[in-house]
Image: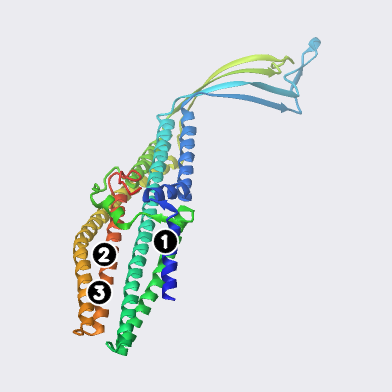
Amino acid sequence: MILFVIFIAFSCSDARAALHLSLNDAVDKALEASSQIKSAESDVMSADHQAAAQMTYLLPRLTFDANYRYVTNVPSVTLGPLGTIQFGDYNNYSVGPTLSYTLWDTGLARDSWNSFKNLAEARKQDLENAKIQIQLSSRLAYFRVQLAIEELKLVTDSLKVSNAQYKDISDRFAAGASSRTDQLDAHREAQSMELNLEQDQANLELAYRDLSALLLADTQAAELDPLEETYKSFASANFSPPGEEHPRIRSLQHVATASHLASESQSSSLWPTLQVSARASYEYPNTILLASYEQNTVQATLTMPLFEWSRTRHLSSEKEAEAISTEYRREQLKTDLQRDWDKTKIQLETYRRQRTLNAEMVGETEEISRLIYSSYKNGRTNYLDVQSANLRALEAKVQAARTTAQFLIQSATLESLSKSNPIHSGVSTHE
């Protein structure tokens, strides 16, 4: 049974070797597959169209107008020998193009256009932030698979050692050089390692499922970069603290600016608006003459609200309050990002120092394990000491792998919080 489990573990490893999936490949696939990013891209497109539509209010407008009117009573008058004269006709129509332009609106249309442009820029920053979050999620999932693979390998190696020791002790017991108790303890240790192997295989399966869900692809047939190789690509990376350039902060800045401009646009409605228009039409009737005629008109219209129950002022104040609220949220976000960056930086440096200690512990516990087993074979120690030494050696190796994985997790998190975070950020991974 033990040999079968080991065979399955290495068979899975061989199957994964058929396809190599680097960290950057995983990020690219996650970005391509993400519905969140596709949604954000649609939001950007929508905001761009909205801004483009608002810009048209700054330009002249050409329309084609046509109307038809039927009346049941047409006024008329009888003028002696001239007979009865009708002032109009039952059928009335007017057809023609109209060119109109807002000559002056105190900046209403321009402020509104600039407001929508800032909202479009905010959506673009939201898209960049979505990419950063997908990059972070895919990296963390990738690191967890790497750690699960490393833990499975370490437990597999420990199981081999336990099986070898169990066989050795069984041979010694058969020769009368070891006790039945030691043989049973060795067998129990091998079984315990086998259980750990089963659990680590399940953990690896779960980690692969998470990565596959992000990439929308089956990753269980893929070989990933070695954990230590990925560490080398991040070991010397430097990341700047978050600042005004972070997409989340820039998004809120654009939203605040948009609200300020929307408030100014609303305030402009309190002032006069001057519109001019020119129309060329084909009309019927020509007052008392029942005939069609061409009519050209030029018109100027000046409008200004006199009393509206302060509706415009309330709308303007609403947008200004929204702008102030967004600015406060922006300042709070800057504080939160800086706090998270500082905490992550501290954790990163802690794991960097722990890696050095872990390397020393792994070497020492392996040596102690070998020495104690040699001492046991010479009859100077009991088998419980051997078990304890084997367990400490395994724990040291697993802890070293987990520390490396945590270092990578904190590095990726720190990058997502950094001042500027282009996708992949130039960090080279093993290809």
Q: Which amino acid lies under the numbered mark 3 shown in the image of this protein?
A: Arg
The residue positioned 35% from the left and 65% from the top of the image is 153
In this view, the residue in front, 33 or 375, is: 375
* Residue 224 drawn above or below residue 244: below
Q: Tag 3, which secondary structure? A: helix
Classify 27 as above or below 124.
below
User: Which residue sits at x=76%, y=24%?
Assistant: 90
How many numbered discs, if any? Answer: 3
Q: In which quarter of the image is the N terminus?
A: bottom left
Q: Which amino acid does label 1 sit on?
A: Ser
Image position, residue 325 (x, y; %) = 34, 49
Residue 392, numbered label: 3
Mark 3, Cα crowd under 10 Å, few <14 / some 14-19 / many 20+, is: some
Q: Which colour scheme is used?
A: rainbow
The amino acid type found where label 2 is placed reads: Ala
Among the 4 quarters of the image, the one containing residue 364: bottom left
Q: Please state the horizontal and vertical placement of residue 209, each as a whole percent of the image.
A: 45, 61
Residue 318 visible within the image: no
Q: Where does residue 35 sit, x and y in percent of width and height?
A: 48, 50
Residue denoted by label 1: 13
Specify the quadrant of the image occupied by residue 283: top right
What crowding class fits label 2: few (fewer than 14 Cα within 10 Å), some (14-19), or many (20 or more)?
many
Rendered residue at 36%/69% (across/down): 156
Give SS at disc 2.
Answer: helix
Q: Which mark is residue 368?
A: none
Q: Can residue 228 be seen in this view?
A: yes
Q: How far apart are marks 2 and 1 (CA)?
A: 21 Å
Question: Which callout, 2 or 1, points to the residue nearer the camera?
Answer: 1
92 left or right of 258 in image: right
Counting residues from the N terminus, which is met first, the one under dot 3 or under dot 2?
Answer: 3
Residue under numbered circle 2: 400
